[in-house]
Structures are given as structure tokens and as C-alpha cells.
Amino acid sequence: MPIVETKVFNDTLGKKNVIHLNNAGSSLMPAVVLKAQVDHLNLEAEIGGYEASDREAEKIQAVYTSVATLINCQPSEVAIVENATVGWSMAFYAIPFKPGDRILTAEAEYASNYLAYLQIAKEKGVSIDIIPSGENGILDLAALEHMIDHRVKLISITHVPTNSGLVNPIAEIGEIARKHDILYLVDACQSAGQIPLDVEKINCDILSATARKYLRGPRGVGFLYVKSSVIETLHPPMIDLFSADWVSENEYVLRKDARRFENWENNYAAKIGMGAAIDYALDIGLENIEARITELADYFRSQLRLIDGVFVHTHCPVQCGIISFALDGLEAETVKERLKADGINVSVTTPFSTLIDATRRQLPNMVRVSVHYFNDKDELDRVLDLLRKIAK
Ligand SMILES: Cc1ncc(COP(=O)(O)O)c(C=O)c1O
């Protein structure tokens, strides 16, 4: 279904209260997503938590199918976890690195991922190599090809970084990873819900995402995809009685599906909420969502560039819903607070979130505006007017 503004606006309860431009932080849930969770919480209160998950077993299983439909994989290749970091880490720390192995990653890599590389580098004698980006910020594919040798164990890329609208060419990177038979991990935390994702086309082995951002789901839940042929080569860093069967005093047997990366207890209301959010996005269509976000973000970016004293980060030709910028002589936090006082939600991105990119490009703290399809041009014009006043 194409985007029907009135329906989408009415479904977004928070739109009455705020101009929400912090969708890269945590978006506004559609009413059905909220209801799906509240219904399950009510059921837990009425009949008991275990009894509620038993009764809703089919609905809970259907969440795996929803994720699988979203990214074009099998439900058995999906684990549902607490957030993107848990999903990413459960897979990353399962990789059997040995001394001398290399990890190739991109400049705008997310802090938590890079911290994990540093830990493994220290513990296992692995090296981290940064694939350079061209002037426009996009990863340089020729440089990547050039860097590959037999020691490269992993190519690990963030699709859309947390600090800008940059969209890395993950399918082209995937082709290179396949050609050289190298394990390929994609952090799709900021792209899931705003850009169509197809793991077959991306050619990735592992992909992680979270519910609360562009998917418009609840906080505290996310998912991990692991390709079927790779699952059994990865031993989760932490196991429990759900991910493994305890078969004798000295033996256990791991699950054969991706749920070996889950553990027993989880927040079923949030899980069901994520399923409802994915179904809502699928109903609208990810192509429609992407087109509308691109239109709104391009408009905002182009108007922003006309304001004196505004520096807009990222000039790459393909950009998504995230726009980061700085205003001359004003702290990003001050701008955020000024906007907040007018009922406008934005966030601040600091160099610490993407240190390599920020250092190379000498980026300051920046205001991050992240638009979604439920935003509209009137809202953006109000924000732009205010920014013109603030910038004076
Ligand atoms: C690119 C990227 N990856 C990973 C994460 C971590 O996601 P989560 O907080 O759900 O673990 C974020 C969060 O902002 C992110 O922007």
C-alpha cells in the first residue's frame, strides 16, 4: 500500500504532541504496535506470564516469519534478542579468530562494534584495518579489493552510520566478500525500517538490527540474522538451557538454528511489538517508505544548506533520512535544547559514536535530525524557520 498520509498520521499518536525528528534514536510507535504490547502485558497480568506466552505461541512464532519476510531469509535463520548490540555481539564474539587474522571495516564504524574489534585485537592478536572512503564518504570498493589477502577473516560494515545520511554499498561489498569467500557481517541497525534489506542480494552471512529506530518498534528488542550454512560454524559466546541441550554430565548439544544466539527469558510483549512494527512497515512497503524518507530528507538537507553558518555533514550522492549538521558558534546541545523547547525532538551525535570518521573529517558535536515517513513538509518548515532564527 502506498503511503496514505491521513492513516499514517492518525496511527502515530505522538505526532499530536511533538515534531519527532529523532527516529535514528528511537521512533514513535504506531498505535497497533503499542496495542499489541499492551494486550500481551494485560494477558500476562490476567493469566500469568508463562501461560500468556503458551497461549500466544503462534503469534510469537510469527514474529520470526515477519523478520524473515523483512530481510528475505528463513525464520530458522533469525534470533530475537534484546537489542542490535546483543545480536551483533553474539555473532561477532562467536567467530573463531586466531592470531594474525584481519578484520576489515569502514571509516564510519559504530563505537560499540569498534570497541569489540579492539577487545578481540588485544585478546587474540587480530588486526583491524580500515577500508578508506572516497571524498564523498562512501567506502572505496577498489581499495577494499586491494586490501584483501588470505588473512582477512571478516568484513564488517555498518550500512548506515549513526552520525550521518551515508549509505554504504553493502551489496557491492557483499559481492567482493563472496568472491573471496570471506565472512561478511552487516550492522543494519539504522537502515532496517528505512531501506529495503534483502540478505540474498546483500550476500551477507550475518546481519543485526534493532526494533526501536526506523522500524518503529519497542525499545529493548532487536534481531540477528545468521545464514543457515554459517550457523553451525559459530559457537555463541554465552549459552544457556535454551540455546543448548544438556545431555550428560560432560556434554551439551547446541541448537542447530539461529536461536542458539538467544537465551531463555525474554520480553514477550516487546517481541510481539516488534512483529507488529515489522508487519506495519511491510504493509506500507519498504520501497514506499524509502522513497518518502528520501524526499523529505533531501528537502530538509537542501534548505538547511541555504542557511548561513550551517555546516551539513556528508555530501555523498546517496543519502538516507539522517541529516547531521553544526551551527557556527553554537553548541549542538544548545540547539537541541532550543528545538526541544518548541516541541521538536532531535538528537546530538558526538565524535565518540564514530571516532574514526569524526577524527578524519574533524567533525564536532553535531545536531542529528532523522526524518521518517510520518513526518511532513510543514513540520520540516517549522524546524527550518526556527533554525534560521537560531543561526542569526
Ligand atoms: C549504527 C548502529 N549500530 C548499532 C547500534 C546499537 O543499537 P542498540 O542500541 O539497539 O544495541 C546503533 C545505535 O544507535 C547504531 O546507530
Image: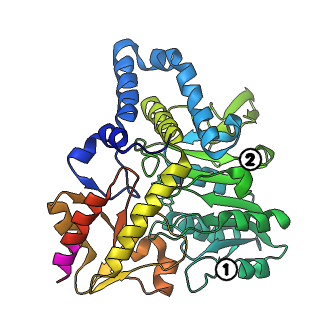
Q: Position of residue 19 (x, y in %)?
A: 25, 55
- Given residues 147 and 373, the one toward you in this image is 373
Is the residue marked by circle 1 packed among few (<14), some (14-19), or many (20+) residues within 10 Å?
A: some
Res. 292 image quadrant: bottom left
Label 2 sits on residue: 227
Secondary structure under tag 1 reads loop
Is residue 329 on the magenta stretch?
A: no
Q: What separation in Å lies between label 1 and label 2 (alpha carbons)?
A: 26 Å
The region drawn magenta spans 387-391
Label 1 sits on residue: 140
The label shown at residue 278 is none
Q: Earlier in the sequence, mark 1 or mark 2?
A: 1
* Amino acid type at mark 2: Lys
Secondary structure under tag 2 reads loop
Is the residue marked by circle 2 packed among few (<14), some (14-19), or many (20+) residues within 10 Å?
A: many
The prevailing secondary structure element of the residues shown in magenta is helix
Q: Position of residue 293 (x, y in %)?
A: 44, 58
Res. 122 image quadrant: bottom right
Disc 1 + disc 2, Cβ < 8 Å: no
Judged left or right of residue 237, residue 294 is left
* Amino acid type at mark 1: Asp
- Given residues 220 and 385, the one toward you in this image is 385
- Residue 105, visible in the rendered structure: yes
Give the quarter of the figure containing the C terminus: bottom left
Is residue 388 on the magenta stretch?
A: yes
Res. 334 image quadrant: bottom left
Q: Position of residue 157 (x, y in %)?
A: 62, 66
Residue under the image location 27 percent in, 40 percent down: 13
Residue under the image location 47 percent in, 45 percent down: 211
Q: Is residue 320 above or below residue 89?
A: below
